[in-house]
Image (cartoon, helix red, strand yellow):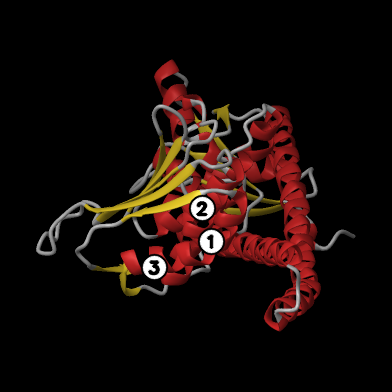
Amino acid sequence: MTPANTKPHICIVDDNHMAREVIAEQLSVESYRVTQVTGGLELLQTFDTLKPDVILMDVMMPYVNGYDVCQEIKQDPARSYVPIILVTALNSRDDMLRGLGSGADEFLSKPVNGAELRARVRTMLRIKNQYDSLQSIMQLREDLAHMLIHDMRNPLTVATLYNNILLKRNQLTPRDKEYAILIRDSLRNLTGFLDEILTTAKMEEGLLKLTCSPKDIGRLIEDVVKGHQEVAQLQGFQLKLDLPEERRLTSIDPTLFKRVLDNLLSNAFKYAPDQSEITLRLRYLKSNNDRSATPSFRLQVMDQGPGIAPENYERIFNKYEVVTLKQAGQEQVGLGLAFCKLVVEAHHGRIYVTPNLPQGTVFNVEI
């Protein structure tokens, strides 16, 4: 005998007791676990306890109708994957369109035909099972990625430690010192990349909280640029700062914001031509006494590289577009830009791209 908790769970939602009994009877020939729910409000209140695999729901119910219940469920990312079949005596085109608009997956007309009912439920269960399988695969992939990231930290730490020892001994030839500096910065970038993967995952799961405090944005920019000066000199870039003389404090998470700056500078270094200029410009957008919702500052990272096609301005910040864009020859993309977008938006700001005429790209950050 199949354990009850492993059987597909079907919830019948209808305020009419007889209508619920009829559907339950028609499903009794299948190996399902069936629960009868007396209305939409009860379903919403007990949804997480019931954990239904398929919902069969009447449209015309008191207090809240089936359309509204369906819409509320489908708008919740944690519940939207559950298939909903609306069971209704309404059969006009407008009723059908309203049901589709609310997120319904299927429709059944009253009086319900038993064979059709069972066929529709089996179809919805197949869809639900495919979704569950996909979620399991994705979770396994995430777990493996996190495990690999943690396993990589130890050799990275060792390599960084011994590389720093070589630099501090000051016994290297000028050429070897250049190599050691490049190795140090590459190791730092790789460590930062691993941190970004974990941070991005936490942000998407809502587990990461900003640790904001009043900071001088200009000073933060200067600190980050100082850490990139050696690499800029080795690669022949002119790294310029365009900062206002006025100093202001802005509430920000300094650790995450520095990573955003690191990413944008590293991105500019990667694609800017030799001997070109990379400029960081900061402008305050409102006075100290202005408490409006407008951004308080705009940071611009300006390079003279090959630029980005306007149709890709939004796509480069989407981590799911990275592979497609790389294959299409758009090099100025990576997970780092998706990370920047998450951090900036967590600060209630925005990041966007504009052209740096006559040649190059400007990454704009407004917070």
Disc 3 designates what residue? 220
Mark 1 crowd level (few <14, some 14–19, many ≥20, 10 Å Cα) = some
> Which percent across, then down, holds residue 253?
40, 69
Residue 136 has which mark?
Answer: none
Q: How many numbered discs sit on the rendered protein?
A: 3
Task: Decide if residue 344 is on the left or right side of residue 37.
Answer: left
Query: Which callout, 1 or 3, points at the residue further toward the start of the chain?
Result: 3
Image quarter where the N terminus lies is: bottom right
Q: Residue at x 49, y 39 (%)?
A: 58
* Chain-order first, disc 1 or disc 2: 1
Q: What's the residue at 9%, 64% (across, down)? A: 289
Name the kind of residue labelled 1 in the image: His
Instruction: Name the residue located 19 percent from the left edge and 64 percent from the top edge.
Output: 246
Q: Is residue 176 visible?
A: yes
User: Which picture quadrant has residue 326?
Assistant: top right
Crowding near the residue tagged with mark 2, few <14, some 14–19, many ≥20 C-alpha atoms within 10 Å: many
Label 1, label 2: how many angstroms apart (C-alpha)? 8 Å
